[in-house]
Image (tube, helix red, strand yellow):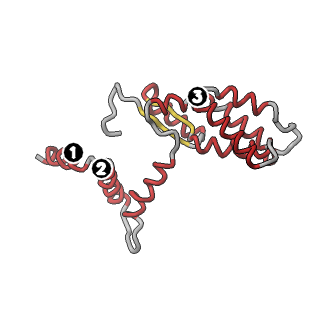
Amino acid sequence: MAGFGKHTHLHAVGDGASFIAAQVEGRLGTHGRYLVDFYHVCDYLSAAAKAIRSDEKSAAEGVDTQKDRLKSRRASEVLQALQAHLEPTAVQETDAPVRRCHRYLSHRMHQLDYQEAIARDLPIGSGEIESAHRYIVQQRLKRPGAWWRAANAEHMLALRLNRANNQWRAYWARDSKLAA
């Protein structure tokens, strides 16, 4: 983590996997915050809305309402709305999208502060990073006929990331000072 200092605050976005959130908390402590990927949450909301509302337009409107609530720190209202439609416990988990959504959100309430992220102009979804993986990493390292040793691939990746983050000149300036 280049440039990470005692006053640095890092923002992590992930799919809600507990081991990822635990790593962020364990490695960054009070210097980091974990946010569940908004678009991943929307997948759960969409599945629940389709189970609650019979027509597609009404389901889409329901999802939009819940998305607005999440973006304005009203996640508890989302849970209340889902609570009224929970499937009976006799229904198999795979056939209970409302219950899955409710449980998913209720276990991650402290990771749903989208309003804060938006106010700080931080991403609420991981799509940008996932997309960058394709054009920064794979474009260079997965060319036809290319092969890499692990250590060399890591160095190439570091160069690609410096270039993508507009840190190219700073990297080479720092590198030349280290060599002197």
Residue on which the image places disc 2: 162
Residue on which the image places disc 1: 170
Q: Residues within 10 Å of mark 2 (few under 14, many from 20)?
A: some
Residue on which the image places disc 3: 72
42 or 92: nearer the eye? 42
The mark nearer the N terminus, 2 or 1, is 2
Residue 1 position, x and y percent, is 36, 39
Residue 161 position, x and y percent, is 34, 51
Apparent side of residue 45 relative to residue 141 in the rendered image (left or right): right
Up-down relation of residue 2 to residue 163 (above or below): above
Q: Residues within 10 Å of mark 3 (few under 14, many from 20)?
A: some
Circle 1 or circle 3, nearest the eye: 3
Residue 35 position, x and y percent, is 54, 35
151 or 37: nearer the eye? 37
Circle 2 or circle 3, nearest the eye: 3
The reply to whether callout 1 and callout 3 are in contact (CB within 8 Å) is no
Q: CA distance from mark 1 to mark 3?
A: 39 Å
Three-letter code for the amino acid on which mark 1 is drawn = Ala
Q: CA distance from mark 2 to mark 1?
A: 9 Å
Name of the residue lying farthest toward the front = 57
Apparent side of residue 2 relative to residue 38 in the rendered image (left or right): left
Apparent side of residue 88 relative to residue 179 in the rendered image (left or right): right
Q: Secondary structure at mark 1?
A: helix
Residue 108 appears in which quarter of the rendering? top right
Apparent side of residue 123 relative to residue 165 in the rendered image (left or right): right
Q: Secondary structure at mark 2?
A: helix
